[in-house]
Amino acid sequence: MNSRAKDIRMSRLFGEGKNAVIVATDHGQTFGPVEGLVNFPKAVAKLKTADGILMAPFMSTMTGDLFCGKNAPAMVLRLNWCTGLALPWGYWQARTVQMMTVEEALALGADVVLANLSLQTGDEANDAANAAVFGRIAAEKERLGVPLIGEVFPPDPMRSKLTPDEWHVHIRTVVRIAVEMGADMIKTYYTGDKWHEVCEGAQVPVFGLGSEKTPCSVDALRLAAAQVQAGARGVVFGRNVIQHSQPDRFLAALRDVVKDGADPLETVQRYGLD
């Protein structure tokens, strides 16, 4: 167990003790070549000012010198694959398999690893299997001193069945379960006015995700601001960055809001965003 090594690697995300901005570029492993990531090397080259970049493991071989140098972003690699993330195919059972070990991720240059944990799938055996995958990754990352982001992503059919309060309770519950199982940080959905309960119950840094592309830049920045104000230590935004007409400028604006508490509307005007 090497907690010092974990602290060193986590510090790459939280420079100067400020909140972190991570950009997700791992959509291709479940969505195929989505808008904004068709030319992967060209897309990630615009993300150099992010604190971290989340990607599927082998896409790290297409990033050139992005992760080299003193102020380079941290490399965050996803280690498991969940059918519940393959939304275009309508999968609903959220079955999870491990794609890569933590040791193999380190060999690719990872600073941080991420693993999905989907529970309450409607099948107890499936829940147990998903927990086992997460547990194996957690045990290995602890032995090797690598921080783990636990991604709490509820099974897709649940979203239409649960009330907002039930959705919040599910997120709050599974987030704490992921932490108890070894997550050093959390990535999950914003649940609204009670989201501070998610952050308080986690007891580790929580990142709010951006989900689908918003119609206007200010909407995405307001979401980020609300998450941070509720206690998040940062955000993991994907499509709102990579599918923006000016991804580098939007990323700069997002950093101002998340790290320095800038006003979203004023920030949009200052950067000339749509």
Image (cartoon, rainbow, N blue to C red):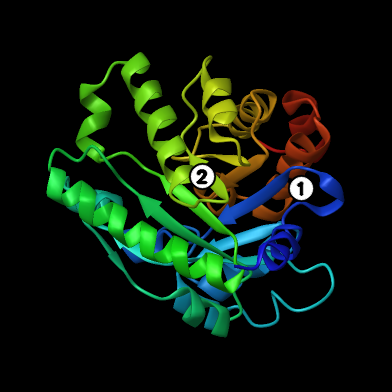
Left or right of 70, for residue 57: left
The residue at the point 71 percent across, 47 percent down is 20
Residues under numbered marks 1 and 2 in contact, where contact means CB atoms less than 8 Å apart: no
Residue kind at label 2, given as amino acid type? Lys
265 up-or-down from 119: above or below: above
Residue 241 appears in the picture as rendered: yes
Q: State the residue in front, 235 or 178.
A: 178
Left or right of 226, for residue 70: right
Left or right of 257, for residue 120: left
Q: Position of residue 86 (x, y in %)?
A: 26, 54
Q: Residue furthest front?
A: 1
Q: Nearer the viewer, mark 1 or mark 2?
A: 2
Q: Position of residue 271 (x, y in %)?
A: 79, 40
Q: Position of residue 62 (x, y in %)?
A: 54, 81
Q: Which structural element holds mark 2?
A: strand
Image quadrant in which the C terminus is located = top right
Q: Position of residue 79 (x, y in %)?
A: 42, 67
The numbered disc on residue 252 is 1
The residue at the point 43 percent across, 58 percent down is 115
Q: State the residue in front, 88 or 71.
A: 71
Residue 94 appears in the picture as rendered: no
Q: Residues within 10 Å of mark 2 (few under 14, many from 20)?
A: many
73 up-or-down from 116: above or below: below
Mark nearer the N terminus (1 vs 2): 2
36 up-or-down from 141: above or below: above
The numbered disc on residue 9 is none
Counting every numbered tag in the picture gives 2
Residue kind at label 1, given as amino acid type? Ala
Marks 1 and 2, how far apart in space? 21 Å
Q: Quadrant of residue 157?
A: top left
Residue position marked by numbered label 2 in the rendering:
187
